[in-house]
Amino acid sequence: MTERAWRIGMTEEAWHIEVTEKAWRIRMTEKAGHIEMTEMAWSIRIREDD
């Protein structure tokens, strides 16, 4: 994975990973998380509400 653009960010409440060339995104927070893969056209979303 040399010529691909990776962006990984982490905070206390959230982290996300982005791969721009493959156009998919993973994000997670304390209360919600979702995975999106636009090129393959599927998404997973999980939410926890009090």
Image (tube, grey):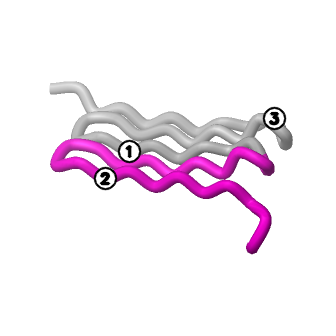
- Quadrant showing the C terminus: top left
User: Amino acid under label 1?
Assistant: Met
Say whether disc 1 or disc 3 marks the residue closer to the N-terminus: 1
**Relative image position of residue 47 (x, y in whole percent):** 36, 32
Number of callouts: 3
User: Amino acid under label 3?
Assistant: Ala
Q: Which residues are magenta?
A: 1-22
User: Amino acid under label 2?
Assistant: Met
Q: Which mark is residue 28?
A: 1
Q: Nearer the viewer, residue 49 or 41?
A: 41
**Relative image position of residue 20 (x, y in whole percent):** 71, 45
Q: Which mark is residue 46?
A: none
Residue that protrudes farthest toward the top in the picture: 49
Q: Which residue is mark 3?
A: 41
Residue 33 located left or right of residue 30: right
Q: Residue at x 84, y 39 (%)?
A: 39
Q: CA distance from mark 1 to mark 2?
A: 10 Å
Residue 32 located left or right of residue 8: left
Residue that protrudes farthest toward the right in the picture: 40
Q: Are marks 2 and 3 in contact (CB under 8 Å)?
A: no
Q: Residue at x 44, y 47 (%)?
A: 16
